Image: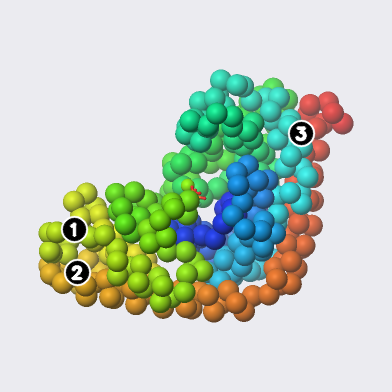
């Protein structure tokens, strides 16, 4: 059975952008394919500690699993949740792959260049994490790894490492699908990109300091509604979907569509030409606050115990699968 694998770093509470752009698409994929695929959802806690943690890491880990469940992920015997640090094979394979990867190729990673830029002394993990990510994927022979465009280069690196390892040491790893095929598998035309509410030219990010620029998944619904009402728009005075000239309005239309499930074209034609931006804002504020209320109520129903039970059984599976693959790699290298 083929494997789909995904993980989101758990450094803080997620935003509406993370929810609509990463969580919901993954839940859709998982529910669609979990009868015929292994669906591995892991918490990359070793990736999380590369940078500062906002809050308590243990609480963040549990909450992240709850997010998937509250977003509608249907659990069956093919869906596996696990914490990366509870499966030691990740760190061990990372070391072996470190001996296969070159400084040249890892130095070319755009994420590394961006994240280390301007930092007087950045930690080694910022440089090495794509190799750990390769281990995360190769240990489970995962073919599909739905990620944002910012991670495509790391998928290509993983493919190169797997092919090089197989050539040098014998067929050991399944090479993940090419990024173009990954996109096809996700059946999306465009990746979702929710904009910052105050500066809609930029994307909404959890690390942006301004409170009103982002909606957090734990915002009180009324507070989220206020943030939508104070979102930056424009002075055209006419609703039109035009990301370039009217990014604020276009962002609101996008959010309305994704939150309600009404196709974007339909939302656009309902509001096209409307001159009172306040009416559109009111409708979007209502939709978002309703969605948050439902999501938060579901979240509150999921107990820590339920999550821990899922993690324990998932980690048993993960240690078996990853342990066997690690052993193959150790044998290929002559370590066993
Ligand atoms: P940070 O500011 O810490 O980088 P972030 O909000 O950009 O946080 P990430 O942890 O970098 O979030 O990304 C987690 C996932 O959410 C990724 O799959 C990413 O593609 C997706 N994502 C992040 N921001 C948005 C957004 N504004 N719209 C849609 N998807 C997003
Ligand atoms: Mg980011």
- Tell me whether the residue at label 1 lies in contact with that at label 3, contact meaning CB atoms closer than 8 angstroms: no
11 versus 293 height, above or below: above
Picture coordinates of residue 78 (x, y %)? 66, 62
**Are there few (<14), some (14-19), or many (20+) residues within 10 Å of tag 2?**
some
- Is 327 left, or right, of 205 in this rendering? right
Q: Quadrant of residue 129?
A: top right
Q: Quadrant of residue 96?
A: top right
Q: Mark 3 against mark 2, which lies toward the viewer?
A: 2
Which residue is identified by label 3? 329
Residue at the image point whose x is 26% and y is 60% from the top = 232
Picture coordinates of residue 208 (x, y %)? 43, 51
Which residue is identified by label 2? 277
Q: Of callouts 2 and 1, which one flags the residue occurring earlier in the amino acid sequence?
A: 1
Q: Of callouts 1 and 3, which one flags the residue occurring earlier in the amino acid sequence?
A: 1
Picture coordinates of residue 115 (x, y %)? 51, 36
Q: What is the distance, in whole Å, between disc 1 and disc 3 at their CAs?
A: 57 Å
Q: Of callouts 3 and 2, which one flags the residue occurring earlier in the amino acid sequence?
A: 2
Which residue is identified by label 1? 234
Q: Nearer the viewer, residue 300 or 53?
A: 53
């Amino acid at each position: 059975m083929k494997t789909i694998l995904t993980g989101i770093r758990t450094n803080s509470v997620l935003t509406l952008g993370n929810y609509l752009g990463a969580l919901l698409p993954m839940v859709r994929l998982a529910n669609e394919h979990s009868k015929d695929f292994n669906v591995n959802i892991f918490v990359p806690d070793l990736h999380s500690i590369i940078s500062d943690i906002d809050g308590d890491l243990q609480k963040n880990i549990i909450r992240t699993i709850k997010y998937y469940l509250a977003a509608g992920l249907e659990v069956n015997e093919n869906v596996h949740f696990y914490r990366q640090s509870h499966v030691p094979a990740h760190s061990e394979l990372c070391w072996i792959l470190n001996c296969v990867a070159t400084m040249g190729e890892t130095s070319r990673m755009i994420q590394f260049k961006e994240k280390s830029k301007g930092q007087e002394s950045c930690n080694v993990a910022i440089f090495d994490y794509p190799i750990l990510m390769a281990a995360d994927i190769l240990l489970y022979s995962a073919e599909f790894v739905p990620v944002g465009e910012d991670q495509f280069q790391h998928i290509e690196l993983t493919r190169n490492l797997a092919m090089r390892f197989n050539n040098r040491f014998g067929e050991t790893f399944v090479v993940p699908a090419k990024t173009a095929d990954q996109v096809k598998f996700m059946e999306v035309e465009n990746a979702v990109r929710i904009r910052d509410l105050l500066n809609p030219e930029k994307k909404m990010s959890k690390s942006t300091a301004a409170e009103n620029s982002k909606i957090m998944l734990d915002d009180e619904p009324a507070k989220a509604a206020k943030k939508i009402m104070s979102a930056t728009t424009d002075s055209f005075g006419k609703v039109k979907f035009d990301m370039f000239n009217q990014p604020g309005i276009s962002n609101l239309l996008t959010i309305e569509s994704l939150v309600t499930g009404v196709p974007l074209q339909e939302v656009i034609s309902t509001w096209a030409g409307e001159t009172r931006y306040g009416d559109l804002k009111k409708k979007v504020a209502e939709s978002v606050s309703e969605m948050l209320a439902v999501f938060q109520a579901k979240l509150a129903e999921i107990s820590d115990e339920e999550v821990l039970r899922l993690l324990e059984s998932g980690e048993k599976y993960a240690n078996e699968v990853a342990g066997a693959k690690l052993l193959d790699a150790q044998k290929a290298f002559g370590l066993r």
